[in-house]
């Protein structure tokens, strides 16, 4: 199989989908690996190390045109859409529920689109989890940073001082992102509240986090009041393959104190706060209703070296499954690979994405009728 590794073109993205060590294994298994010049530079993996590993350095056009499987980190952007063609398979973070134009183009061109973020093994998301851990930890640090007056915040310390109460941090969701965000906030001595409806997950959090921290069961009234009282809100909810649920509406954000901070890590899937919109590493924040918002869609890239290594360690076994069996055979034989398939044969096949797309289409039809 010919595997292509392009250089990421999304703003601020420096991760790469293969390290030289993975290339060695893929080539030893009889595959050919094409990698774009400079693809690993930002992660500290220079072209020479890929050549030594057995890869061939090529231009971007060749990566896409000659490969059976293109492995990326982030979803293709519009400038890459013209590379799509029948018979091509793409394996990367896709987040198609929040990217209807990309989804439509993949369907139109009969691309087999496999998403890191929906690949599931025994209820876990093994490729997404390390990136969620990094994003969670970074979001806690961003919360502390953005509370500084120079950043538009209230001018308070996340952890307070002797005689001063620490900041109030509301974490929406107690999964991987939420746990790591709460852990960092607690480490800085903030007062943490986690909104998590799963009693089983709350028990697990009790065993992982330090006391004290408060837990909400996710009821809308309680979440809204906690949001109004919060100094920092971290959006950390996920429904694999589907749009993130909207947990805080604009009216609630408008009632928050000026200089409060929102870090919506769920923005890849559309965000879980109504006022959120995607931001970038070069322009990370905006202010709405006096509240500072940070909604970077590729947050882990800030820790690019660790993020690349953790990502490749996690996805390696599944790449080997795809390349050893062939893409179609792997989809049929490997249950984990099957859960990663979002688009295939000109159709949306992932159930959650299909439901989201159907609801979006119904909404559009309804809007046209009422217009």
Image (cartoon, rainbow, N blue to C red):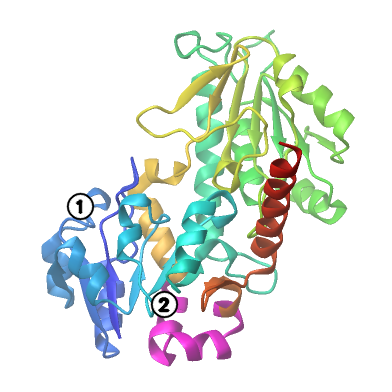
Residue at 52% in and 34% down: 295
Cα separation, mark 1 vs mark 2, equals 22 Å
Label number found at residue 163 = none
Residue at 57% in and 89% down: 332
Does 324 appear in magenta?
A: yes
Residue at 50% in and 21% down: 286
Q: Quadrant of residue 368?
A: top right
Q: Residues within 10 Å of mark 1 (few under 14, many from 20)?
A: some
Q: Secondary structure at mark 1?
A: helix
Label number found at residue 319 = 2
> Where, quadrant-wise, is the N terminus in this rendering?
bottom left
Please identify the dominant SS of the magenta region: helix
Q: Nearer the viewer, residue 232 or 208?
A: 232
Q: Residues within 10 Å of mark 2 (few under 14, many from 20)?
A: many
Instruction: Name the spot of residue 309 as percent of width and height, x first.
Output: 37, 59
Residue beneath label 1, please? 41
Q: Secondary structure at mark 2?
A: helix
Residues drawn in magenta: 316-337
Does 317 appear in magenta?
A: yes
Instruction: Name the spot of residue 124 as percent of width and height, x first.
Output: 65, 66
């Amino acid at each position: 199989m010919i595997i292509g590794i392009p250089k990421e073109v999304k703003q601020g993205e420096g991760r790469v989908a293969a390290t030289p060590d993975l290339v060695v294994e893929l080539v030893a298994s009889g595959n050919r690996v094409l990698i774009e010049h400079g693809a690993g530079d930002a992660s500290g993996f220079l072209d020479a190390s890929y050549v030594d590993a057995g890869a061939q350095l090529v231009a971007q056009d060749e990566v896409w045109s000659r490969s059976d499987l293109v492995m990326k980190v982030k979803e293709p952007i519009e400038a890459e859409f013209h590379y799509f063609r029948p018979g091509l398979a793409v394996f990367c973070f896709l987040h198609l529920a929040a990217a209807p134009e990309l989804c439509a183009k993949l369907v139109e061109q009969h691309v087999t689109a496999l998403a890191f973020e929906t690949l599931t093994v025994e209820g876990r998301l093994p490729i997404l989890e390390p990136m969620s851990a990094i994003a969670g930890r970074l979001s806690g640090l961003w919360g502390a940073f953005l509370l500084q007056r120079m950043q538009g915040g209230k001018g308070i310390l996340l952890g307070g001082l002797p005689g001063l109460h620490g900041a109030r941090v509301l974490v929406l969701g107690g999964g991987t992102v939420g746990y790591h965000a709460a852990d960092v906030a607690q480490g800085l001595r903030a007062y943490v509240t986690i909104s998590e409806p799963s009693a089983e997950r709350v028990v697990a959090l009790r065993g992982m986090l330090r006391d004290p921290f408060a837990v909400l069961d996710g009821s809308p009234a309680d979440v809204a009041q906690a949001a109004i009282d919060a100094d920092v809100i971290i959006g950390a909810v996920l429904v694999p393959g589907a749009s993130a649920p909207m947990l805080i509406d604009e009216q609630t954000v408008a009632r928050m104190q000026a200089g409060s901070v929102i870090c919506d890590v769920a923005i890849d899937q559309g965000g879980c706060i109504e006022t959120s919109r995607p931001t970038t590493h070069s322009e990370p924040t905006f202010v709405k209703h006096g509240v500072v918002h940070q909604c970077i869609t590729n947050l882990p890239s800030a820790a690019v070296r660790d993020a690349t290594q953790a990502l490749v360690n996690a996805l390696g076994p599944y790449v080997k499954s795809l390349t050893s069996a062939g893409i179609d055979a792997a989809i049929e034989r490997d249950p984990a690979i099957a859960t990663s398939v979002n688009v295939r044969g000109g159709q949306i096949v992932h159930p959650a994405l299909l439901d989201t797309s159907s609801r979006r289409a119904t909404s559009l039809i309804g809007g046209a009728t009422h217009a």
